[in-house]
Image: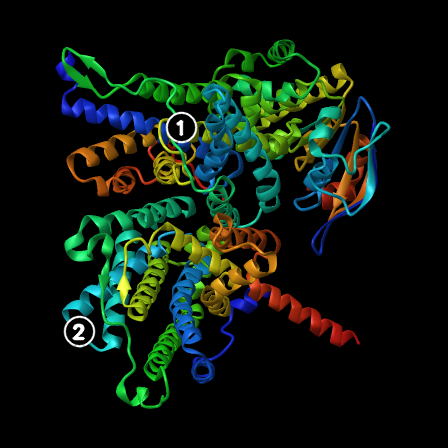
Amino acid sequence: MKKLATLRSSMPTSARLLFTLLLTIVALGITFSLTALDDSKLAGGAAIAIVIVGLSWLIGWSGQVSLGNSGFMAIGAYATAIWANHHATTPVVFTLLLATICGAAGGLVLALPSTRLRGPYLAGMTLAFSFAITPLALNFPSVTGGSGGLFLNFLSAPKWFANLFSGSQALIRANAQWSADVAIVVAAVAFFFMANLFHSRTGRAMRLIRDNDVAAELTGVNLQRTRTLAFVISAAYAGLGGSLLTLLTGSVSPQTYSLPLSILLLTLMVLGGIGTLSGAVLGGLIYSYSDNLVSLINKVTGISSASTFGANLKGIVFGVLLILTMLLAPRGLVGMGGRLLSLVKRRSAES
Amino acid sequence: MIHVEELSVSYGAVKALRNVTFSAPTGRITAVLGSNGAGKTTLLRTISGLVKPSSGTIHCDKTALVGMATEDIARFGLGHVPEGRGVIAEFTIEENLRLGVLASQVSAAEGLERQFELFPVLGERRKQYASTLSGGERQMLAMARALIGRPSFLLLDEPSLGLAPLVTAEMMRTISSLCLSENLTVILVEQNAKSALRIAHDAVVLHLGSVIASGTAESVASDSDLRRYYLGLVQ
Amino acid sequence: MGSFLSSRIITVLLGGISSGVVIALVALSLVIIWKSTHVLNFAQGAMGMLAAFVGMNLVFKGVNYWLCLVISLAMGLVVGGITERVLIRPLYGKPEINPIVVMVGFLGVIEAAIPSIWKSNFNAVPAPFSQIYYQSHGHTILVSPFVIYQVALALGVMGAVALLFQYTDLGLQMRAAALAPEVSRLLGVRVNRLLTLGWILSSGVGALAAVIVSSGQSLAPTNMDGIFVSAFIAAAVGGLESPLGAITGGLLIGITESFILNYWSTNMAPLAGVIVLVISLAIRPQGIFTRNVTRRV
């Protein structure tokens, strides 16, 4: 019965649009009250959240495992940097779209041989891809800038926006908040599309495939096409996220988009909650504030961040969190929140 | 003797067995009959410890089986030929049999020799993969594998399934003579009531998880209502 | 003969085989785990390195190389057993993504924990045999006693694993537990213990692979990363179920890598796996050594 309920669309599209708009406005409002540092953290988190929601869509809803999304991010990032260096005046929207398309194209190329494959093989293929990105970037320095990477102008606030700020560091604050606001709007659009996709025909077909691919095929779902589509969409989201991240930081380097990033993405997705939009948002927030979390642990335990142990603390903390989440609360923070909520409801109903 | 007392099994909200009580005496074949979904396979799987009962007890002679692990029940001396025979197709005949003897006190050489005597067909083809065997030969292999460790109790789940009538008849004769020569306690689950009742000493009829009749095979076989409504036997 | 053995193509081939056997060995260890528990162990390389760190670090304290090797192996066995009991056992019957995620997490923990425990001075482990290449009639053949040792140890371990699975009762039970767990239990096989044993064995093999890789070079936590990725692809190329397929895949990737290194570019070597995978998928999508089996629903 539960399964049937999730198959039904929970909200009409117009309601989803309204909901997204509302949340976006609230988020934009919040950026006004934040410091420049928090604003730029938030911007990075929004970019990562886009990638996570794409991954979540692939893993949580179509049941395919990809470790290659850092590679698609790299495609988006390099496309952005290369384009921006040749056409500096291009509107941001266009650059983002271009990078999204490049990511999708990369996804399609990789999907053609791999979506025929089931889980483990796909994981192997994407793992190999994610491992090959750094060497590929290093091998074509004339295009990618080699190990030094590429630089471009990062997002800066337009005049009318900058004029809203005054006092010392006005420009820094304006730029930080502008980039956060742009990132939030881009993420909102991406999430809105994803919410509709979840409830679309394709989304339902994917869930059927995940639960039982043979049965899905018997009911007339085209397995290969649906799987390929799922993979391509996920890659497009990674491309978009990579592009946004590049615009925010103003640089690309080949080492950023290697296997550890894929692992980090997987971790954030699981911590937030696989297959949910809110989980992806939480994952992005955890990304933004992971350094704060680690320094908090440093402070509480007294481990110096300068010691070798302190330097590796982040890796250990994330690894342990990932393992514990999967073993104890496999549906992540969202699942825990949901359980808590139903517990509270039951309590209040009993009393 | 296998004694089942007030045994109930649930799969979620579905009750697969309801307060099932019966005894399978030593040295005799007890047929468990009933239509599809009557709970026959569940009964055997519960005796073997593959399914945990919600209540009730199972005793093999004096030993209580409920709560024991499947492996330990097998080592204790209960052979179970599962539905679909469970022959490992990727193994040779000899490997299948060796697997059966490893957990017992019997030595592999001695066990193999005995089973090849009982089932000469298997001995001739010992190095062949089980995937090359016919349905009847697979059933023989599955029985040989269950018997090779010299169990005192034997559970057979639909041994006649998918076999030609002549092969079924031969299979039933083999079961009958094994029960006699080894003094086995046999529980024979069958949908094919006619051939099962021909060799069984006692019979239990299950319907929707409950025992609706039990007694000697003759008494069950001669009850015309049972024959018509539950066993699908028309005069 | 000497000029033939030192000719470029043979040199490249020999180099490919000597790195390929290690990839093959790790691929084999992945297949053992996959067959017994249907888990893709993403931490296999890292677990091997952890064991090698415990054992081989003692070399720097003056302990004999061979004793260190044995200690590494023992550690590998222990790590494998504990991992299965603590991290994997609770996840049986859960979606296939769950153990993957847990092992990815474990990979992260190990790679961050090793430099924390052993600090960052990754010294070179001395090679137990001479690393000077053989000469033949004035030509250098890119094979040294040390290379022969590496290849021989890897092949020896593979042979031992093959013998265990094919010819012993334990191997028979392990194969049965993997193929038909329920039937095996009905025959009194203690399946749960054998699953743990599969992990123990596989992790031991992984530890030996890590020792082979880390001998004669610096002991670093990431030594196995590239090899693990290649091994993973090798196992996939072989269809994941087939030990022979995994070994063949490993050798193919090693040789391809060597050709890329020598004829194309050092940077492109990590592409070897992708190339072999794509080609093998084009030829036989179900894996080169898998029979066509209908998938159970």
Q: Residues within 10 Å of mark 1 (few under 14, many from 20)?
A: some
* Mark 1 vs mark 2: in front: 1
Q: Is residue B233 visible?
A: no
Tag 2, which chain? A
| Res. B33 in view | yes
Residue under numbered circle 1 = C125
For the residue carrying disc 2, how many other residues have a C-alpha within 10 Å: few (<14), some (14-19), or many (20+)? few
Q: Amino acid at mark 1?
A: Val
CA gap between label 1 and label 2 equals 52 Å
SS label for mark 2: loop
Label 1: element kind: loop
- Location of residue A125 in the rendering, given as x and y in whole percent from the top left corner: 34, 46
Q: Looking at the image, is B167 positioned above or below residue A62?
A: above
Residue B14 is labelled as none
Q: Position of residue A121 (x, y in %)?
A: 38, 44
Between residue C269 and residue A275, name the one nearer to us: C269
Pinpoint residue C70: horizontal percent, then vertical percent: 51, 22
Q: Residue at image x 37%, y 60%?
A: A230
**Residue in the image at 42% along x and 47% along y:** A119
A61 left or right of A174? right
Q: Which residue is mark 2?
A: A88
- Label 1 resides on the chain identified as C
Residue type marked 2: Ala
Residue at left 15%, top 25%? Answer: C8
